[in-house]
Image: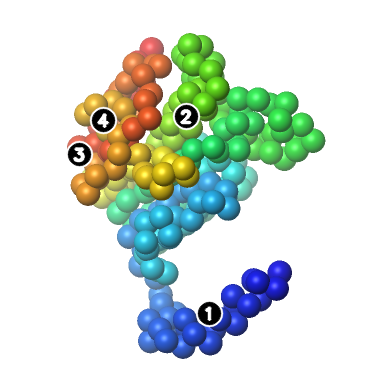
Amino acid sequence: MDHLLGGVHQFRTQVFEQEKDFFEKLAQGQSPSALVVSCSDSRVDPNLILQASPGDLFSLRNAGNLVPSFGASNGGEEASIEFAVVALGVKDIVVCGHSQCGAMKALLDPASAAGLPAVQSWLKHAETTRRIIAENYQHLTGAALLDATIQEHVLVQMENLQTHPAVAAKMQRGELRLHAWVYQLETGSLLAFSSETETFEPLGSETQAIGGRPRRSPGTVRQQPKIQKKARTKKRPT
């Protein structure tokens, strides 16, 4: 705790004082350009990864970067999404998963969450991901299976986001774009889903947007992202 208190003092006496005009302007209101849904993992800091300043991002963080379908959760996810989209008018929503995600490990190995009933209950919102992996990725094990789970999970959240009325309405008007990313802890790189290649690829200088569930054959997740140029509404093949 001492280092945290020291950080507070350093922020107040150095950072805040040097940028006082900036922080006073922030106090008058916020206008973030994007909502970022990410994991609560202490190693994942969206502002640091994206080199964003205070006021740039509206953040929603929880275990496993989950977006429960509309009406499925009593948590604050619905309110945060609605406020970001309607009240703040964000133009982009990013769901950012990450490598070595503990929530996804627990999804694959429920026994590892024994004694954590709240975690087990929360992961019920990831049942779609679990089912997709169980039925389509039997050929993978170990790290490859975890990577596939992390990526599929991010894509499932794309579908879940579109069950939220505010998101669906804005996307229908072409006023909102969705982005599916995975952050690699080991390399610091970002992967983004490309609807053109139907896989995850290294994120370049130009991003693409996902509209609707990207169409892709099950079992083809690879370790690379981007994001699609045009909104699409195609569903997962059956």
Instruction: Mark 2 vs mark 3: give the one in front.
Output: 2
Q: Residue furthest right?
A: 115
Relative image position of residue 53 (x, y in whole percent) = 38, 68
Relative image position of residue 193 (x, y in whole percent) = 32, 34
Q: Which mark is residue 195?
A: 4
Q: Residues within 10 Å of mark 3 (few under 14, many from 20)?
A: some
Q: Do callouts 4 and 1 mark residues in contact (Cβ within 8 Å)?
A: no
Q: Which residue is mark 2?
A: 147
Q: Earlier in the sequence, mark 2 or mark 3?
A: 2
Q: Do callouts 3 and 4 mark residues in contact (Cβ within 8 Å)?
A: yes
Mark 1 and mark 3: span between their CA atoms? 40 Å
Q: What type is the residue that disc 2 sits on? A: Asp
- Residue, x 38% and y 41% (percent of image)? 181
Q: Which mark is residue 229?
A: 3
Q: Secondary structure at mark 4?
A: loop
**Is residue 3 among the parts visible in the rendering?**
yes
Q: Which residue is mark 1?
A: 11
Instruction: Mark 4 vs mark 1: give the one in front.
Output: 1
Q: Is residue 162 above or below residue 222?
A: below
Q: Nearer the viewer, residue 77 or 43?
A: 43
Q: What type is the residue that disc 1 sits on? A: Phe
Q: Do callouts 2 and 1 mark residues in contact (Cβ within 8 Å)?
A: no
Mark 3 and mark 4: span between their CA atoms? 8 Å
Q: Residues within 10 Å of mark 4 (few under 14, many from 20)?
A: many
Q: Secondary structure at mark 1?
A: helix
Mark 4 and mark 1: span between their CA atoms? 42 Å
